[in-house]
Amino acid sequence: MDAVARGASVSTKIERRSAAVRLALRRCADTFGFSENESILSFAAEALEIPHCVSPLVSAIKMLVQILLPIATTLLAYLILPLLRILYHNFSSPLRKILRGPPLSNVLVGNFKEMTLDARRASEWREEYGATFMFHGLLSIPELHTSDIKALNHIITHSEIYQRADSERDGLHRFVGEGLLFAETDQHKRQRRVINPAFTLSHIRTITETFIEKAIRLRDIWTEEITHDVDTKNDFRGIIDVLPGLRKLTLDIIGRAGFGYDFNALEGHTSELDQAFTDLFHAPHANLYAAVRLAQTAIPILKLLPLPGTFVLRSARNRMDAIGRQIIGKSKAGLVDEEGLKALGGRRDILSVLLRANMSPDLPHSQRLSDAEVLAQIPSFFVAGHETTRRAHAAASWALHALSTNVAVQDELRRELLAVPTDNPTLDDLNALPFLEKVVRETMRLHAPVLFMLRKAMTDDVLPLSNPVIDREGKEHWSLPVPKGQIIHLPIWAVNTSTEIWGKDALEFRPDRWESIPAAASAVPGAWANLFTFLAGPHHCIGFRFSLAELKAILFTLIRAFEIRSANVEGGIGPVLSGVMQRPGVLAQENGSGLPLVLKLVQEV
């Protein structure tokens, strides 16, 4: 009887358990829209006699899965769709059937790594494949590279079609907001109209004394170093790494002349802004940070991830904003009364000129910049100023390096400079020195600090060519179909060193070539001296006069004071890349740091 009773009891429990499971399945299906088979967790909870207090946890887990599943699907779509778009663009581009180019070396980085490791690789490809060819950028995106002069003129003059590439615009927007560097079309025209007065020749004349003042300070610092080395009988006497000094010099110049702000870098002070740019552009992993920003542009979902350089970018922007608010606050504080307006009128830095121009009664209110737009220019000025600083720093470095290896050129330049009866020349005095002009032109031609710029076709277009392209089937093409979205490289250095334009000695530093400019150079689209260095058209470098006056002031001061020779370091001196910029450095050292030169005081020679 006991056995029968126990069997009946077990049977009853099983029936109750089954009923409980069926009820749980129905409730789960009703509540969450699952089928009964999907409510296996409830069945397990009942079958294993898990306490009822755990059932809400099971339900919460299922609800969490239900919420996260569409989110995960969406994120996956954001990741996959850009890749599919890239693949489609890659295989559907009509240029693939026409243009040749280097083989794909890596699916993820394309030929990007080759270009960043060797500044002259693009020129080698040009020799092999012609002036117009295709190569692969990051994620194997096909990119058009052309140094064809007719094509470049077309691109430069049609800025409504060919605008900054997404990689540049996205990085600039995150870094500087919607200032001049980011603006396009009508917004760019309106902002540039207000800012132009700060970069006219007449205004550059008024700030040239700042260039000279800071250059003299660097001259004195180096003189003290040389004198100290002689007094202490240092084995390395006279050998100075000129890069740090030139960088501090150009930073102090842009601070004073650009914003009325004293960085005092030459005096050994370290500013938050300088540190921010150092972290972003000069850190050991600067090229990695640049690659990450390019990848984030191609796949926007990557911006949500804490990838290398993300925090550095955010930190730099925060520092710029803080200093920008401080600077503009001081400037605007001077506008509240007549005395302040008079003081502002006497200031000659770029920011003050912008504020005055924006308040001009001749400027219609509809064309004026709002307070928010003026504030947005501060980060733009910081970045543009830093880029100007980097260019000036790189150009001055290249000039000193070139003169150290061309003693006859250096001696001729010094004779001309020493004939000037003052240490404080005006801009007109500097511009009246013909050999200094030749040296500056040759430096900017052979050692353009920026290697290339990017443009993106905003609509389908046809690109005319001055020389035909021969496709894979031997057919000539005097124009190229450019699909919307096509990325185009404008190779500044390759154009400036083209043997077709400048002759067989295009890679030699020879200032005398400027006595007779080749006829082919007249067709080069350039804002200055038939060079592609500062581009041309609506988006040419607005600060090119600033850069040229700065370089002339630096060379005038330093070459008058020092005889400069190469230090003959192990590994030699060569181009070191940082993003799209190049500067000279010791090739045998990590990151190519340093540019050691032997300096002797002229009166001791």
Image (tube, rainbow, N blue to C red):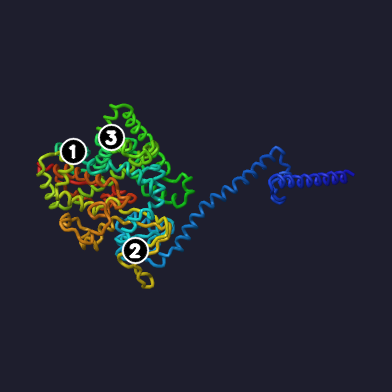
The CA span between labels 2 and 1 is 49 Å
Q: Residues within 10 Å of mark 3 (few under 14, many from 20)?
A: some
Report the amino acid beneath label 2: Pro
The CA span between labels 1 and 3 is 19 Å
Label 1, secondary structure: give it.
helix
Which one is earlier in the sequence, the residue at label 2 or at label 1?
1
Report the amino acid beneath label 3: Gly
Report the amino acid beneath label 1: Ile
Q: Residues within 10 Å of mark 2 (few under 14, many from 20)?
A: many
Residue named by callout 1: 216
The N terminus appears in which quarter of the rendering?
top right
Is residue 436 in view from this perspective?
Answer: yes
Residue 95 is situated, as x and y percent measured from the top left of the image, at 40, 64
The residue closer to the viewer here, 173 or 392, is: 173
Task: Give me the residue at 16% from left, 49% from top.
Answer: 436
Residue 330 is situated, as x and y percent measured from the top left of the image, at 33, 30
Residue named by callout 2: 464
